Amino acid sequence: MSTTQSERLRGLLEPLVAARDLDLEEIEVTPAGKRRVLRIVVDSDEGVQLDECAELSREASVVLDDTDVMGGAPYTLEVTSPGADRPLTELRHYRRALGRLIKAQLTEAAGSGELIARITGVDDDGLDLEVPGVKGRKPTARRVLFDEIAKARVELEFSRKSEKPETADKRDAQHEEKIDENKEEA
């Protein structure tokens, strides 16, 4: 995607995205066979609902059809929210990841290496983290400045240890009761 096309796309799409109180995270044009894919990635502090993506896609399609910014070749338009594994690069990304586990590559100034920790606080300068304890040790608090982070991503968690087993058991039992009720109604 040429810089000119990127700038034109951003100029056309940013007002549509901002009108919905969303952040325009990324615009990407990639080849896909004889077509191209125009992917618009949006996000907000509250997350992005599927309906919002669909409505924004319709609005963007109208605006794009009224211009020559995509040229004459066919393309597919995708409006989506960022994936769970997207890089954390902006202050707002870290704020949205508050309470989540992250994996960060540290700069040489911070001692290099990799750090896996939970974000407990975010301010303009950096992060307050809780580093999990190893071999029965208690977690430790750590402060990392943004300029000490080379790159970072949210770590996917499939189960949170903070949820008590009996809570999960009760939830599962309630779910099973609803399934049984639905079978009786059918």
Image (tube, rainbow, N blue to C red):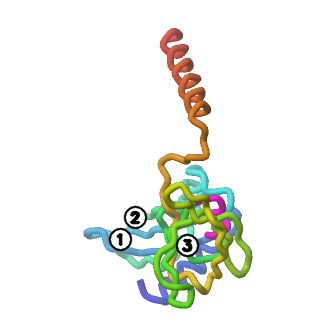
Identify residue type, mark 3.
Answer: Leu
Crowd class of label 2 (few under 14; some 14 to 19; many from 20; radius 10 Å): few
Q: Secondary structure at mark 2?
A: strand
State which quadrant residue 171 falls in: top right
Crowd class of label 3 (few under 14; some 14 to 19; many from 20; radius 10 Å): some
Magenta range is 93-100
Coordinates of residue 48 in the picture (x, y in percent): 61, 56
Residue at the spot 59% in from the left edge and 30% down from the top edge: 166
Foreground tag (3 vs 2)? 3
Q: Secondary structure at mark 3?
A: loop
For the question of whether residue 170 can be seen, the reply is yes
Which residue is tagged 1? 36
Residue at the spot 56% in from the left edge and 35% down from the top edge: 165
Is 100 above or below relative to 18? above
Coordinates of residue 175 in the picture (x, y in percent): 55, 25
Of the two numbered discs 3 and 1 on the same chain, state the one appearing first in sequence: 1
How far apart, in angstroms, are the residues tagged by discs 3 and 1?
27 Å
Identify residue type, mark 1.
Answer: Arg
The answer to whether mark 2 and mark 1 are in CB contact below 8 A is yes
Can you tell which mark lies on residue 88? Answer: 3
Is 126 above or below relative to 86? below
How far apart, in angstroms, are the residues tagged by discs 3 and 2?
27 Å
Which residue is tagged 2? 76
Identify residue type, mark 2.
Answer: Thr
Q: In the figure, is residue 43 to the left or right of 122? A: left
State which quadrant residue 20 falls in: bottom right
Would you say residue 10 sits in the magenta stretch?
A: no
